[in-house]
Amino acid sequence: MIVILKNDVQREKRDQLIEWLKEQGLGIHISEGEYQTVLGLIGDTGNVDMELIESLSIVDSVKRVSESFKCCNRKFHPEDTVVEVGDVKIGSGHFAMIAGPCSVESEEQIVAVAKAVKASGANMLRGGAFKPRTSPYDFQGLKATGIELLKLAKAETGLPIVTEIMSVNHLPLFEDVDVIQVGARNMQNFELLRALGKIDKPILLKRGLASTLKELLMSAEYIMAGGNDRIILCERGIRTFGDYTRNTLDLAAVPMLHELTHLPVIVDPSHATGIARLVRPMALAAAACGADGLIIEVHNDPMKALCDGAQSLRPEDYDALAKDVFGIREVSLG
Ligand code: PEP
Ligand code: MN
């Protein structure tokens, strides 16, 4: 249920209403917008007297929210959320250009790629240290050393770092990581989501391989219910009967998610297609349909990459892509 307050309500009266609602065992999510304040009621609202609340002089209207996701629901928070990562903002017109290798392989590799993508306009560096691989015999990432190398690349370039967590036990290693990624395979690792709800760091939450948008939003809800509302959603392709691409990029998810939630939505055209030459057209399409950013795999020598070389762009290809993406954004933003 949401309670929309009238404009210019006295703080004291607003707080009295909140206290009274809390006494009924409800959690209250307050969204203070430029034009209106929305109180989102969380918990069992079955016994809440809607008519009584509606009759209060400070209340404009009361609505039931039928969806099971509440905190991330746009009805609870009508304005776009802007996630801040250092000086970088994502959402509501602020665009994230996250780029870097699938996995961190060496200091030379990560620093070279970081410098190159920064020169092309990237504002964050990605790189896997803990890699979720289908085969246990494949390269599993440099783990803690990989995070140290990302920190070196950050020190060299100033780019905030984004890297994936696979286990809640590794959380202490992520202290200096700017954005913690929850990969597709862990989207429904509820223990992990709950733990990330308790920390004060932005989370990049990728859609599961066969997850619906509702499931993605329920996973965001796990994190938000714990108190962490700095979440970036990511469409990274889903499993379908498409046979020539690694996954099927569900671009309609971008405008649909923008309707359903106030959280920023970025697109990963690298994992969505699995093919380097398809990354540029899909990145442009994502920018055109309103995505709040892109996360793209770039490697200085894709032929020798230890992971996902086939979908990795060379730095010069990323440079050309970035120019075109910025061009599309200028056109689509008018
Ligand atoms: C990744 O970004 O490195 C990754 C493993 O992505 P996903 O979880 O989308 O497969
Ligand atoms: Mn990858």
Image (cartoon, helix red, strand yellow):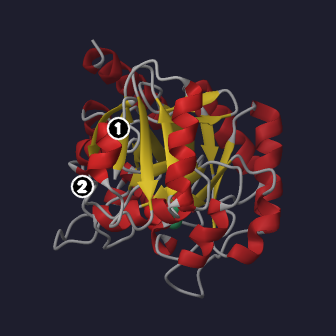
Residue 34 in the image: state x and y as whole percent: 44, 20
Amino acid type shown at disc 2: Asp
Based on the displayed image, in which of its 4 quarters is residue 236 positioned? bottom left
Find residue 291 and name its label.
1
- Pick the residue in front: 115 or 290: 290
- Pick the residue in front: 290 or 6: 6
Q: Is residue 93 visible?
A: yes
The image quadrant where one finds the C terminus is top left
- Pick the residue in front: 2 or 94: 2
Disc 2 + disc 1, Cβ < 8 Å: no
Q: Which residue is mark 2?
A: 250
Please tell me which residue is depicted at 77% across the width and 39% down the height of the picture: 154
Please tell me which residue is depicted at 48% across the width and 29% down the height of the picture: 319
Residue 27 in the image: state x and y as whole percent: 53, 57
Please tell me which residue is depicted at 61% across the width and 38% down the height of the picture: 124
Q: Residues within 10 Å of mark 2 (few under 14, many from 20)?
A: some
Question: Which structural element holds mark 2?
Answer: loop
